[in-house]
């Protein structure tokens, strides 16, 4: 009898605990949405000068490095580091300028005949979407032409993955972008930072800086991430370069080997028919 009473008390306690925990996370998410809406309600003036030109000509793309303002260099802000490396590769490192209207730092340029806006939000990660939505509105960028670069706990450092839309997968910065743009079609470059080891909390892990050993890997990560972004911005150029490199190289990726194998099989199957046709003639 006493055991049943104790067990029922434990069950009630656990039930109450999980209800409060769920309520906390629900309220936190609701609060973030309210903050996003309030900040988005602030008006801004239309683009002027060179910005107006990019706003009115053709289709535009935007690359966003998600992160925490004032915490550059941390794992959680690796997206900002990638944007810095991208700007440096394009020779635009000295072109960053603060834009209060979009709450971020912006570069407006043209990359291989593609009009591109680079954005580093100057807000906390949880409300990065405000800057993204404002910049998309100001420069006339459609959500499907936005590429979000952000950290990914579930991928080890050195691993980068392109994700075509979908849920935020627990990333608050991406969730903010989904809330503010009211869609989840945005392309994402997920840059692995790995999960914490030992008893280190996730929060402490993502807000800490890379170690000296990790920094060596990070340099390669930034280079590869920029390569991926450029291939997404200018897919036609990347396909041409990949086809030319595959024709000039003896080794090819798995897809290239399969295609070559199929061509050889077709040639072999066609050759008997050709031989018989020539024999009849």
Image (tube, helix red, strand yellow):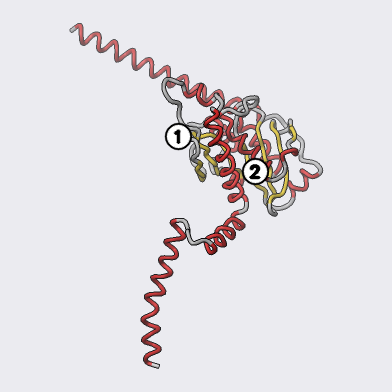
Direction left: furthest residue = 1
> On the rendered structure, is 242 left or right of 91?
left
| The label number, if any, that marks residue 62 in the structure image | 2
**Is residue 127 among the parts visible in the rendering?**
no
Q: Position of residue 142 (x, y in %)?
A: 63, 45
**Quadrant of the rendered image containing residue 216:** top right
- Front residue (pair 40, 173): 173
**Is residue 18 among the parts visible in the rendering?**
yes
Q: Position of residue 245 (x, y in %)?
A: 55, 60
Q: Position of residue 68 (x, y in %)?
A: 61, 27
**Tag 2: Cα neighbours inside 10 Å, few (<14), some, or many (≥20)?**
many
Q: Position of residue 73 (x, y in %)?
A: 61, 29
Q: Residue at x 62, y 53 (%)?
A: 234
**Nearest to viewer (mark 2 / mark 1):** 1
88 to 198, vertically: above or below: below
140 to 254, vertically: above or below: above
| In contact (CB < 8 Å): disc 2 and disc 1 | no
* Residue identified by numbered label 1: 154
Direction bottom: furthest residue = 281
SS of the residue under disc 1: loop
| The label number, if any, that marks residue 116 in the structure image | none
Total number of numbered labels? 2
Work out whether mark 2 precedes mark 1 in sequence or the reverse, and give the earlier one.
2
Q: Residue at x 59, y 25 (%)?
A: 34
Quadrant in which the N terminus appears: top left
> On the rendered structure, is 229 left or right of 163?
right
């Amino acid at each position: 009898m006493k055991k049943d009473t104790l067990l029922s008390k434990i069950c009630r306690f656990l039930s109450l605990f999980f209800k409060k925990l769920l309520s906390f996370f629900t309220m936190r998410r609701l609060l973030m949405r309210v903050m996003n809406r309030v900040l988005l309600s602030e008006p801004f003036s239309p683009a002027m000068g060179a910005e107006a030109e990019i706003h009115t000509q053709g289709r535009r793309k935007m690359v966003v490095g998600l992160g925490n303002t004032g915490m550059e260099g941390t794992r959680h802000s690796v997206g900002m580091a990638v944007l810095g490396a991208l700007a440096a590769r394009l020779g635009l490192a000295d072109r960053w300028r603060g834009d209060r209207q979009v709450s971020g730092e912006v570069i407006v340029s043209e990359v291989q005949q593609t009009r591109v806006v680079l954005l580093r939000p100057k807000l906390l990660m949880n409300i990065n979407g405000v800057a993204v939505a404002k910049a998309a509105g100001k420069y006339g960028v459609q959500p499907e032409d936005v590429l979000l670069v952000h950290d990914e706990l579930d991928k080890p450092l050195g691993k980068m993955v392109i994700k075509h839309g979908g849920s935020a997968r627990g990333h608050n910065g991406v969730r903010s972008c989904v809330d503010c743009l009211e869609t989840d079609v945005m392309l994402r470059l997920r840059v692995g930072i790995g999960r914490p080891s030992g008893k280190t909390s996730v929060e402490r892990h993502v807000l800490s800086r890379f170690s000296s050993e990790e920094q060596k890997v990070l340099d390669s990560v930034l280079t590869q991430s920029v390569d991926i972004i450029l291939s997404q911005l200018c897919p036609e150029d990347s396909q041409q370069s990949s086809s030319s490199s595959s024709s000039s190289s003896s080794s090819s990726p798995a897809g290239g080997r399969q295609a070559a194998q199929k061509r050889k099989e077709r040639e072999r199957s066609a050759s008997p028919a050709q031989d018989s046709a020539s024999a009849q003639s």
